[in-house]
Image: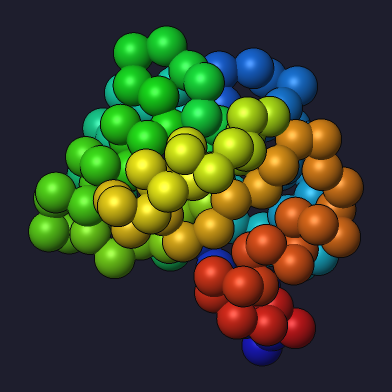
Amino acid sequence: MPFAKQLKVMVVDDTSVSRMLVCDGLWSFGVGDVVVAADGEQALKQLMATPCHLVISDYNMPKLDGLQLLQALREYTPTRNIGFILVTGRGDKALIDHGKKFGLNNFLPKPFNNDGLRKCVEQVVGKLS
């Protein structure tokens, strides 16, 4: 069974169109177990109840931004080792360096395409096929 079929991913973004772009990309390369959250606070509650393998989160969101979500996940033992990819249109070095202090695994600059998304995911979890 391809690894993509075993992978559980959470997509977190306050914009439904952005969530669907990421989900469509994941589905296109075989990731079938994808859950979504509309903001960082909702994501944190869901992940504390049911962790996943990988979180792909927007940076700029209400309630908890992407880095605040990452920090909260790293502070809670059951979610500490979840892979984390930050999606941002603001991919400056200071933001990425700040994220790495909390254990950011990778980042995906906006705009992106499915090939870029797949490469980014595979850098965190390994080959999907």
Q: Position of residue 106 (x, y in %)?
A: 54, 58
Residue drawn 29% across the image and 65% down it: 81
84 up-or-down from 24: above or below = below
**Left of 121 or right of it: where is 59?**
left
Residue drawn 28% across the image and 51% down it: 102
- Can I make out residue 42 in this image? no
- Can I make out residue 17 in this image? yes
User: Which image quarter: residue 40?
Assistant: top left
54 up-or-down from 64: above or below = below
Residue drawn 75% across the image and 22% down it: 17
- For the C terminus, which image quadrant? bottom right
Residue drawn 37% across the image and 43% down it: 98
38 up-or-down from 77: above or below = above
Q: Residue furthest top?
A: 62
- For the N terminus, which image quadrant? bottom right
6 up-or-down from 111: above or below = below
**Left of 61 or right of it: where is 51?**
left
Q: Position of residue 45 (x, y in %)?
A: 26, 32
Nearest to the observer: residue 55 or residue 97:
97
Q: Position of residue 120 (x, y in %)?
A: 67, 62
**Left of 92 or right of it: where is 39?**
left
**Left of 84 or right of it: where is 103?**
left
Q: Position of residue 43 (x, y in %)?
A: 37, 33
User: Which image quarter: residue 32?
Assistant: bottom right
